[in-house]
Each structure stands twice: as structure tokens, then as C-alpha cells.
Amino acid sequence: MDANGKPSGTMPIGAFSMSLSVKDLAASLAFYETLGFEAVGDFSDQGWMILKNGDHMIGLFKGMFEGNLMTFNPGWDQNAEAVDPFVPAADIRAKLEAAGLDVKDAQGGDPAKSFVVTDPDGNVVLVDQHR
């Protein structure tokens, strides 16, 4: 913490993507393919897909949450490959809580690996560790 009680130093929080709440996976996939994205993770049988265009990733999620989320995946790079060392989600959570942020468990996730925080403007940030 710095003299103002703010977290000090950088804290890598993993790969970044936008998680989009969609009504129709097929229609959304077709739209984003037109923008140059391609499916790199097809879990459509579970209601979600991961798309990529260069270093940019988006997730399409049908019926899993309301609104769109910024998502960070500790322990992964932008190719969903493992990185070491990395800062575990539990450590990130502890640092955010120590800074006074209101951290909540992510729906259906392991609280040690998955949580959400909301920024001052109402934007939701999901930290979701898969390893």
C-alpha cells in the first residue's frame, strides 16, 4: 500500500477478454466471424464459445450472466497457455479486499479462483482462474 492506502506496484492479473452475454450463439458467432474473429474454443453444447482475432479474445455466453464483463484469467497468456510464475486469483482477491474493494464470489465459481468486482461506473470485472 502507498501512503494513501492504495495498492502499490503492478499486479499481473492474466489474459484479458471481453465476456459477452448473447441471445443466440450462432448469430453472434456469424457476426464476429465477419469482423475477423474465429472460434478457438467451442463449448456451444454448454452455451459458450471463445473467439480470437490476433491477440484479442472475446467469449460468447448464452444465459450464463447478465450484461457484459471484462474478464481476466490468472495463469494464462492471450493464447490460453499456462504461464509461470503467476499471481493466483486468491492473492489478487486478498489484495483487492485489503484495499477496501467490495469483492464478491462469482456465480457458480470456486471463491478461491473466481470472483467479481465492480468499478465506480458499474462495470463488472471477472477474475477467473482456470488452473
Image (tube, rainbow, N blue to C red):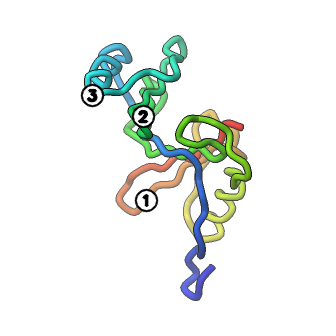
What's the mark number on residue 35? Answer: 3
Residue type (three-letter) at the residue carrying disc 1 = Asp
In the displayed orientation, state which residue is furthest to the front: 54
Residue corresponding to mark 2 = 58
Question: Helix or strand or loop: what does disc 1 sit on?
Answer: loop
Residues marked 3 and 2 touching at CB (< 8 Å):
no
Residue type (three-letter) at the residue carrying disc 2 = Ile
Taking the spot 48% from the left edge, 28% from the top edge, the residue there is 64
Of the two numbered discs 3 and 2 on the same chain, state the one appearing first in sequence.
Answer: 3
Q: Nearer the viewer, mark 3 or mark 2?
A: 3
Q: Nearer the viewer, mark 1 or mark 2?
A: 2
Q: Is residue 15 above or below residue 107?
A: below
In the displayed orientation, state which residue is furthest to the bottom: 3
Of the two numbered discs 1 and 2 on the same chain, state the one appearing first in sequence.
Answer: 2
Give the quarter of the figure containing the C terminus: top right
Q: Is residue 96 above or below residue 18?
A: below
Residue corresponding to mark 1 = 119
Q: On the picture, is 123 further left or further right than 34?
A: right
Pinpoint residue 126: horizontal percent, then vertical percent.
52, 46
Taking the spot 60% from the left edge, 63% from the top edge, the residue there is 11
Q: Is residue 72 above or below residue 47?
A: below
Q: Residues within 10 Å of mark 1 (few under 14, many from 20)?
A: few
Q: Nearer the viewer, residue 24 or 84?
A: 84
Taking the spot 43% from the left edge, 59% from the top edge, the residue there is 119
Taking the spot 53% from the left edge, 17% from the top edge, the residue there is 43
Question: Helix or strand or loop: what does disc 2 sit on?
Answer: strand
Pinpoint residue 7: horizontal percent, then vertical percent.
59, 73
Q: Nearer the viewer, residue 108 or 78?
A: 78
